[in-house]
């Protein structure tokens, strides 16, 4: 298969994976921020989404572009052509629901942001500039091509249009707004989805049908 055919296949695979999400994520003039329940609690308590300068808990290393820019990491599904969004789906789709069992996705209104503080990718070949570690080693910050954006500065909670809980391992999602009650709603869903996963895993164990997802979910439940 030629390089061009591989690229076309990647777009086709992405379309099959996420086309059903485009009416939700694209065409609304919005940006999107993904967090977990502790992150949501911190946002509600502080009244703002703020960049992680290393003082906030994170599963991601400081080599990611958000740390380099001192910015809030966002998804932008409107600016890039639709096929570019499909091409990048294998990267962003899993990140959008990366926390077990609940990821929280915040819809951000562009109208509440300062345009000059928003960093967006300029075309397919765009890459963050190379950086230098304290060891003198050069590296390129990690990023999600074509759909990731960054906002330098804090984002007030008044910019949040909607709050949605996404279930790990599926595209199940439930609106949990308004923001004032979102933490409690997310915690309730966390308990509900954990219990459902435990029950499903127990049934498959009895039937001898355990799979990788079952083992992962069981391990994450033990971490509570």
Image (spheres, grey):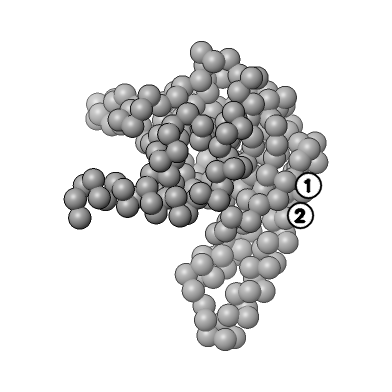
Nearer to us in this view, 117 or 6 = 6
Q: How many marks?
A: 2
Which residue is label 2 attached to? Answer: 188
Nearer to us in this view, 222 or 131 = 131
The N terminus, quarter of image? bottom left
Q: Where residue 67 appears, x then y in whole percent?
A: 45, 29
Helix or strand or loop: what does disc 1 sit on?
Answer: helix
Left or right side of 180 for 123: left
Residue 134 is tagged as: none
Q: Is residue 159 visible?
A: yes
Q: Residues within 10 Å of mark 2 (few under 14, many from 20)?
A: few
* 207 vs 200: above or below: below
What residue is shown at x 47% (from left), y 29% (from top)? 79
Left or right side of 186 for 80: left
Which residue is label 1 attached to? Answer: 184
Nearer to us in this view, 108 or 64 = 108
Q: Where residue 202 appears, x then y in whole percent?
A: 62, 78
Q: Do the numbered discs 1 and 2 sit on residues whose CB atoms are within 8 Å? A: yes
Helix or strand or loop: what does disc 2 sit on?
Answer: helix
Left or right side of 194 for 114: left
Q: Where residue 207 appears, x then y in whole percent?
A: 57, 86
* 183 vs 136: above or below: below
């Amino acid at each position: 298969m030629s390089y061009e055919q591989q690229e076309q296949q990647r777009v086709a695979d992405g379309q099959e994976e996420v086309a059903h999400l485009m009416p939700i994520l694209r065409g609304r003039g919005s940006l999107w921020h993904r967090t977990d329940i502790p992150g949501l609690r911190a946002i509600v308590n502080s009244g703002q989404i703020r960049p992680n300068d290393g003082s906030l808990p994170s599963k991601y290393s400081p080599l990611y572009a958000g740390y380099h820019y001192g910015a809030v990491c966002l998804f932008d599904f409107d600016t890039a052509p639709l096929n570019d969004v499909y091409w990048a789906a294998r990267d962003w789709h899993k990140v959008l629901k990366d926390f077990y069992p609940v990821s929280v996705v915040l819809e951000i209104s562009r109208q509440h942001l300062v345009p000059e503080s928003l960093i967006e990718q300029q075309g397919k070949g765009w890459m963050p500039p190379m950086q230098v570690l304290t060891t003198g080693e050069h590296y390129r910050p990690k990023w999600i091509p074509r759909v990731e954006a960054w906002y330098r500065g804090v984002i007030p909670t008044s910019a949040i249009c909607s709050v949605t809980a996404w279930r790990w391992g599926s595209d199940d999602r439930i609106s949990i707004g308004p923001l004032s009650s979102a933490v409690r709603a997310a915690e309730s869903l966390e308990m509900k989805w954990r219990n459902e996963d435990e029950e499903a895993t127990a049934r498959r164990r009895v039937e001898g049908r355990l799979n990788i997802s079952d083992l992962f979910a069981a391990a994450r439940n033990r971490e509570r």
